[in-house]
Amino acid sequence: MEEEVAKIDEKIADARKNYGDIEVRDAILEKAKWYRLHKDYEVAKKTYLEAYDITMGSSKRMDILFDILLMAIETQNLDLIRDNIEKCKKLLEEGGDWEHRNRLKVFDGIYNILIRDFKNAASLLIDCVATFTSTDIFSFKELVFYAVLTSMVGLDRTIIRQKVVHSPEILSEIRETPFLKQFLDSLYLCDYKSFFEAFGIFSSPTLFIVEIIETVKKDRFMSKHSKYFVKEMRIVAYSQFLESYKSVTLESMAKAFGVSTAFLDKELSTFIAAGRISCKIDKVAGIIESNRPDERIALYQKIIKEGDFLLNRIQKLSRAMDL
């Protein structure tokens, strides 16, 4: 190993003496990639930054930062990922082609998955589907997997229909992953029983985890969020079902989901208490009543609140001017 590094150091020294900055940079990058290949990431990062300092042009500089991002993603160093994404965004403002822009969206999408911002992750990854070329980060199949799962948690049904369900690129790939297609179709087509079967949730309180959850649990980016993902997907399904009804019996809703009334009652009670689902349960009558707030009333209350705040600020300012 030391002999290989020594040879590269000789090449760097020769480039410094006999050639220009481009040759020096290329030799330093060769050294950085050698350390990265041997998983000495700290030394690799320092060497990449040495090459970065003598590199001209936003695209070339972004290429170096992308290599650092690949290392940061492998170790899931969130601070390093965030900092380098911000650097790349500033470089894009100076000038960058569509390929670098799309590649950065993939990195940004991964970062948003890691910090559990599935809404932003979905928007970024879906934008990359039609022009995806970053196969060194992950495969197109994995891109579709992440785009579908994050969109189901983070985006509303209309956007999912436009950008996921009817996307030719996603349709061409999702057929190769039957359990993922079943999972997406069951929610979009309101087949809630099949949706819960994809989770392995049956009328008994025992949960039998099947392929979709096993895949999430083993995934390098989603595994830390597996419990959160399961919980959020249930909330999405319950909320979507209740949007269609002013009131519905607990028994008929339980039947639609293929679970027992006791299981559904316990689940809904937990989510209602946490403020995640807008409804109430009449246990005596066995009825679930939706109590979604009126959007116009909510907007009116928001305007009144902001108006009061503005008036208070004006009054304080006028008193200060009188003094």
Image (tube, rainbow, N blue to C red):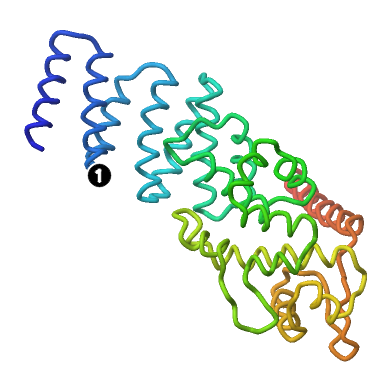
| Residue closer to the observer: 156 or 256 | 256
The N terminus sits in image quarter: top left
Residue at image x 79%, y 78%? 254
- Residue occupying the point 88% across, 91% down: 284
Residue drawn at (71%, 74%), measured in percent from left and top? 271
Image position of 322 (left or right of 87):
right
Q: Is residue 287 above or below residue 307?
A: below
Left or right, 75 with respect to 203, comes to left
Q: Quadrant of residue 190?
A: bottom right
Q: Residue most toward the bottom?
A: 284
- Where on the picture, by quarter, is residue 27? top left
Q: Position of residue 197 (x, y in %)?
A: 67, 69
At label 1, the amino acid type is: Lys
- The answer to whether residue 323 is visible is no
Under circle 1, the secondary element is loop
The correct choice, above or below, for 77 with respect to 270 in the image is above
Give percent across and percent down for residue 69: 40, 39
From the viewer's perspective, tell me whether residue 300 is left or right of residue 257. right
| Residue 19 x %, y % | 19, 9
How far across and how far down the image is residue 257, in percent?
Answer: 76, 72
Is residue 228 visible from the viewing direction of this image? Answer: yes
Q: Which residue is mark 1?
A: 39
- Circle 1 residues within 10 Å: few <14, some 14–19, many ≥20: few
In this rendering, is residue 6 above or below 258?
above
Count of numbered tags: 1
**322 left or right of 209?**
right
